[in-house]
Image (cartoon, rainbow, N blue to C red):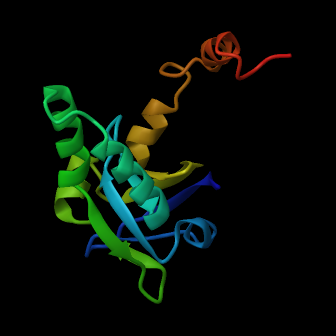
Amino acid sequence: MLIGEFEHSIDTKGRLVLPAKIKDDLGKEFIVTKGLDGCLFGYSLEEWNKFEEKLKTLPLTNKITRDFVRFFLSGAVEEETDKQGRFLLPANLREYASLTKDAVIIGVGTRIEIWDKKKWNEYNSEENLSVDSIAEKMTELGILGI
């Protein structure tokens, strides 16, 4: 399971270090694509294949479905870490996620998210996220609570 929060810098060539703990679960080869909320998503090849299979079941005649599939697949790139554990983030993905220098990689179960550090801090702020409100909604869904 991909968990944790890790801060790293993007070098001048657009490379980012994949933390060893994340690399162990994600694998040496993986997929990175545009994500939601202005970040990038990263999937192991196994999880990506599951995701692609789900996309194949969506109705091609539905415009929202086509938009959704285009969004995720058009930005997807296969990545591989080098000997130093770095991988190259293409310019179009760095631009999409406003990634310049400082990045945060978080594990969220079946994928990682790569955030610009400033955007992550804004997203993760108390003004933006109300943990109590989220917990209340999760309780309503039967995920939290006794």
Q: Quadrant of residue 135?
A: top right
* The C terminus lies in quadrant: top right
How many numbered discs, if any? 0
* Residue plotted at (34% across, 37% down): 36
Q: Position of residue 42 (x, y in %)?
A: 42, 57
Is 39 located above or below residue 1 in the figure?
Answer: above
Q: Quadrant of residue 71?
A: top left
Q: Quick check: can you spot residue 103?
A: no
Classify residue 24 as left or right of residue 14. Answer: right
* Residue plotted at (47% across, 89% down): 83
* Residue plotted at (64% across, 15% down): 141
Choose between 40 and 6: the one closer to the eye: 40
* The N terminus lies in quadrant: bottom right
* Residue plotted at (31% across, 40% down): 57
Q: Position of residue 110 (x, y in %)?
A: 54, 51
Classify residue 123 as left or right of residue 139. Answer: left
Is 7 located above or below residue 17 in the figure?
Answer: above
Q: Position of residue 90 (x, y in %)?
A: 22, 66
Classify residue 55 as left or right of residue 124. Answer: left
Q: Position of residue 14 (x, y in %)?
A: 28, 70
Q: Quick check: can you spot residue 105?
A: yes
Pick out the residue farthest to the right. Answer: 146
Pick out the residue farthest to the bottom. Answer: 83
